[in-house]
Image (tube, rainbow, N blue to C red):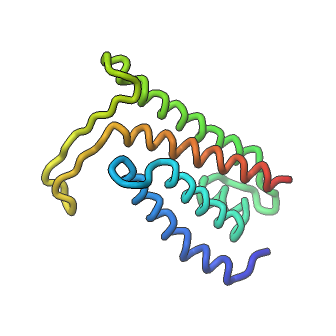
Amino acid sequence: MTTVIMRTTARVVVPIILVVAISLFVEGHNLPGGGFIAGVLTTTAFALLYIAFGLDFLERGILERDVEPGKTPSRDRVVVAYRRVFTFGLTIAVGSGLVPILLDLPFLTQSYVEFDGVPLYGHVEIASALAFDFGVYCVVVGGLLTIISAVGAE
């Protein structure tokens, strides 16, 4: 059973961690950051939620699954969801590297598209490296949460 202080701290800190993770993810192809560190931060936020509120809250509140009251949620279902995220990320990361090969370019060749007149930003460049970073992000989140769930079950 966690304390009120822990739960309150988690409610304040988790959104901040997720905003920093998103910022590092989006800026990762031009500045330090990217999918790996954003994935580690997201996993940290999930771990805090798990410690503060338990697996039941994680299944109901985050994964939006119905859990019968009084029945303990199955760790296996959560681990399967994390493994799916891992597999999806690995597919995206490898696919983003293979697409340039189909266009007769070297593996992981990067390109970008520019957008002008974007509200709040003005000029925005979207790099193809964002797809690779997203794949890495999903691999890190899925892998680390699988490890945390497996170790937490011990």
In the picture, measured across the screen, residue 123 lies left or right of residue 34, that is: left
Where residue 74 sits: x, y (%)? 78, 50
What residue is at 48 percent from the left and 34 percent from the top?
93
- Rendering quarter of residue 134: top left
Is 153 or 114 nearer to us in this picture? 114
Name the residue at 14% across, 50% down.
Answer: 116
Total count of labels: 0
Tell me where residue 137 appears, x and y as whole percent: 51, 46
The residue most toward the left is: 117
Residue 58: % across, % down: 66, 59
Question: Residue at 51% across / 66% down in the picture?
Answer: 17
Q: Relative to 11, is 110 above or below?
A: above
Residue positioned most to the right: 154
Q: In the rendered view of the protein, which quadrant contains the N terminus?
A: bottom right
Q: Where is residue 125 shown, x and y percent of the image? A: 24, 46
User: Does residue 40 appear to the left or right of 73 in the view shown?
Assistant: left
**The one of 107 and 149 positioned closer to us in this rendering:** 107
Residue appearing at x 55%, y 59% in the figure: 41
Of residue 118 and residue 114, the one placed in the foreground of this image is 114
Residue 18, relative to residue 100: is it above or below?
below
